[in-house]
Image: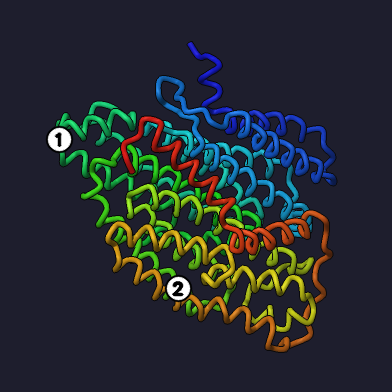
Amino acid sequence: MMNLNDIYTILPPLVLAGGAIVLLLVDLIVPRDNKAITAWLAIVVFAASLATAPLLAGRNQTGFNNMTAVDDYALFLDGLFACIGIVTVLLTLRYNQERGIMRGEFYPLLLFSTSGMMLMAHAVNLLTVFVGVELLSIPLYILCGIARPRVDSEESAMKYFLLGAFASGFLVYGIALIYGATGTTQLSEIARKISVHEVSDNLLLYTGAGLILVGLGFKVAAAPFHMWTPDVYEGAPTTVTAFMATATKAAGFAALIRVFMFGLAPLLSTWQPIMAVISALTMIVGNVIALSQTNLKRMLAYSSIAHAGYILMGVAAGNAMGATGVLFYLASYAVTTLAAFAVMTSLGTVSGEDQSIEGYAGLFRRKPFMAIVMALAMFSLTGVPPTAGFAGKYFLFQAAISSNLVWLAVIGVLTSVISAYFYLRVVVTMFMREPAEQPQPLSVSNFGRSAAVVITGAATLAIGILPSSLLGLVTEAVKAFASAGHPPI
């Protein structure tokens, strides 16, 4: 029988899912021309989910017959997902209205998708991971195409759906093979059986682990499973792209850490070199292809791929320092990327948005504050101090070196140098070039969008200057992860 302790282990995602159901019903009575009410109610639901974290802090327990768990690791990620959700809703308030996509179902879908991400953070069973992935993905397929009848939005949704379903097949087949090899889908039991050599078939186990890596690699846009990212990011509404580039990536890594640093921790010597090679390949592919991009949104898509490679460096490290680096970088990357997309949504015109880098020429003369925030985001993505990106990369490189992956850290540094070209090109365009033609008038600013720009810009700088506060939260999360019966990482 389900009890209160079971509910505790999924309370944050449960609040979001329950709120989404209520919001679907409430939206039926909200006037068609005033869907901003639904948006503000979605922020209330996100805030309510965020408020559950302090209530559950310090708990280390499992529920639903060891299918889910609540610990500071999961709660840290819950807080990150909720904050990303709030910023995303703030960005949509004016953007969706200007693009004619202010549809009430947008916000329940956003809540449902975020609840799936939170469930992935709480999952300690492979079946729960799969349920979380599907709960994350299905609403996102719809959100990518919500700008119908815009062809590029519909194309984005179709590509994401087809490739996402393909990746889910790899994931569920991998889970089946691991079950065949170990007789369980519970991560702690899988780790125990591998440790005491109770695995019936090693080939099944290794093949299953590889297929799971493919499925989750798709979600984090790691090479060579990244092909969908540029087209989907470019075609989806910019607010949806911002959400996918940050929250979806964090959810994928939340599951990767649970599965590989917990369930498959005894196989570290086997999967570590594979993870390191994928990390290097992802950094190289993302940064090199981004060099030739002239569309800012597409450039940020390849940037997202490259940063997945940097984060994979922490997973490949396979230790507590690596897990700390991953969580810290997920937070710093999220605020930085949201800052860039917040500026993008603020600079569109009522008729559309110029996504070309040349469209930002002379921005400092027209909108100095927006140019400064975008420059700050570009510096942070490059890894220039004193921004959040520099602190995040420092911890990841340190983790790689501590695990004798010096060559991987060197590749990380070299690709960061390469990335300076296309990031700083945006800065040069904004500050040192005149517009090629008279720019169209910018869309009217509003409280939500302005607040998102200020919050993300300030956070990008604050994390870089004072990383200790975020590092303290991350360290506690990793300690809880390691002390809740998990194998050493």
Alpha-carbon span between mark 2 and mark 1: 41 Å
Q: Is residue 117 above or below residue 225?
A: above
Q: Can I make out residue 478 in this image? A: yes
Judge the density around disc 2: few (<14), some (14-19), many (≥20) Cα neighbours within 10 Å.
Answer: many
Q: Nearer the viewer, residue 224 or 453?
A: 453
Instruction: Residue at 45% x, 50% y: name it.
Output: 324
In the rendered image, residue 184, in percent from the top left (x then y), is placed at 28, 27
Q: Quadrant of the image for the C terminus?
A: top left
Q: Nearer the viewer, residue 148 or 169?
A: 169
User: Which residue is label 1 attached to?
Assistant: 201
Judge the density around disc 1: few (<14), some (14-19), many (≥20) Cα neighbours within 10 Å.
Answer: few
Q: Is residue 232 left or right of residue 431?
A: left
Q: Amino acid at mark 2?
A: Ser
In the rendered image, residue 177, in percent from the top left (x then y), is placed at 25, 36
Residue 479's quadrant in the figure? top left
Q: Can I make out residue 152 in this image? A: no
In the rendered image, residue 478, in percent from the top left (x then y), is placed at 44, 42
Instruction: Residue at 52% x, 66% y: name it.
Output: 390
Q: Nearer the viewer, residue 80 or 430?
A: 80
Mark number, residue 475? none
Q: How is the image coloured?
A: rainbow
In front: label 2 or label 1? 2
Q: Amino acid at mark 1?
A: Asp
Residue 195's quadrant in the figure? top left
User: Which residue is label 2 attached to?
Assistant: 416
